[in-house]
Image: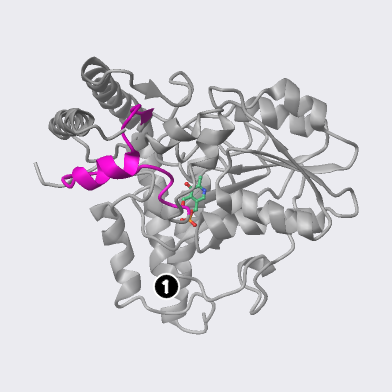
Amino acid sequence: MQLPVYLDNHATTPVDPRVLEAMMPYLTFRFGNAASTTHSFGQEALEGVEKARRQVSDAIGAEPREIVFTSGATESNNLALIGAAQANLPRGNHIITVATEHRAVLDPCAALTRAGFDVTILPVRPDGLLDVDRLRDNFTGRTTLVSVMMANNEIGTLQPIAKIGAMAAERGALLHVDAAQALAYLDINVMRDNVHLMSLSAHKAYGPKGVGALYVRRRNPMVRVTEQMHGGGHETGRRSGTLNTPGIAGLGEAARLARESFASEAPRLAALRDRLLASLQRDIDGLVVNGTMEHRLPNNLNISIPGVEGETLLMSLRDVALSSGSACSTASAEPSHVLAALGVTPALAHASLRLGLGRWTTEEEIDYAAQRLTETVKRLRSMGFS
Ligand SMILES: Cc1ncc(COP(=O)(O)O)c(C=O)c1O
């Protein structure tokens, strides 16, 4: 076993060696520009991009021409929200989202509010799930877009996307889904679930950082997004900028591997996660689980340990890498907005820990992490850290 044990796979994942292998030609001899196809260098680069486009679309039940490559889920969310809100302005200016969304959804929504759009941010139940009846009550004749994430990056909660998709379709609104945390672990199908826009990120699914995709539906209905990156008209005008061919090849392979492995990986990870929880619950008094255990990513655990500050615990726990809040938002001292939305008290939110298991997590690592966490909690509690 190598130390430190990495249990922060919601922040980012290591690159799978098979992904690196798929990227290498585009970093070396296939270095051409995929938009400069008057010679074989560009043609080979373009072939690599189109292969990746097929791999990504296959992974989510879409068509290749519906995939727009971006720099990651943050950009995809911005393009989906601002782009679709602007393109649909003639039909209405009302957008619905949820309080537990990632900042990369909430902040573009705040920008839309400043630009005169009407944004409703729905609360969640104490278990982290959206109440779909509440969603139904909030549609107006001007609602053009609903944005709900598939899997939460802090508490792993899985929202009822199929039900939300059916409801949005009935009301004539588009559904955008941030699936950044879901790609490697869940069965994703945009047609089955009535999803119109979907954000993906490679580095949450054993691919490289700085590359992602936005699915933009082209049939039933044809969805338009106003481009946010102006320039050479790449990606059929939806996102300008020379394509990141190595990154895109990596995302493609990561998506292919995700499809190949999620059905066996999900139960393996859930069993390890449940073993970790059982051990911690047995040995740490008063441990609280944040969010539902029933509808949850198989690799996620989020707990609060009363009386022990998450940050203090992490500083004392050098050989297990985990997070005390959302590491992918800013390093602020504010308690998590996700836990606050569940009604978790600021004290318990500050005492929270997020554990994210991954493709290479072993039982030995889980047992080691549980033992180190328990020892450290007992030591801090005996020193009166409360
Ligand atoms: C749910 C969710 N959406 C969006 C993002 C942003 O993704 P990226 O790092 O690819 O911009 C993250 C992680 O940071 C995330 O967890």
Classify residue 174 as left or right of residue 16.
Answer: right
Classify residue 135 as left or right of residue 105.
Answer: right
Residue 269's spot in the image, x, y percent? 30, 29
Q: Which residue is mark 1?
A: 44
Residue 181's spot in the image, x, y percent? 45, 42
Say which residue appears at 75% left-offset and 56% top-offset: 112
Residue 155 seen in the current view: no
Magenta-colored span: 303-329
Q: Secondary structure at mark 1?
A: helix
Residue 151's spot in the image, x, y percent? 50, 36
Say which residue appears at 63% left-offset and 49% top-offset: 106
Say which residue appears at 18% left-offset and 47% top-offset: 318
Q: Residue furthest left?
A: 1
| In front of the other: 211 or 121 | 121
In magenta stretch: residue 262: no
Residue 232's spot in the image, x, y percent? 64, 79
Q: Residue furthest bottom?
A: 38
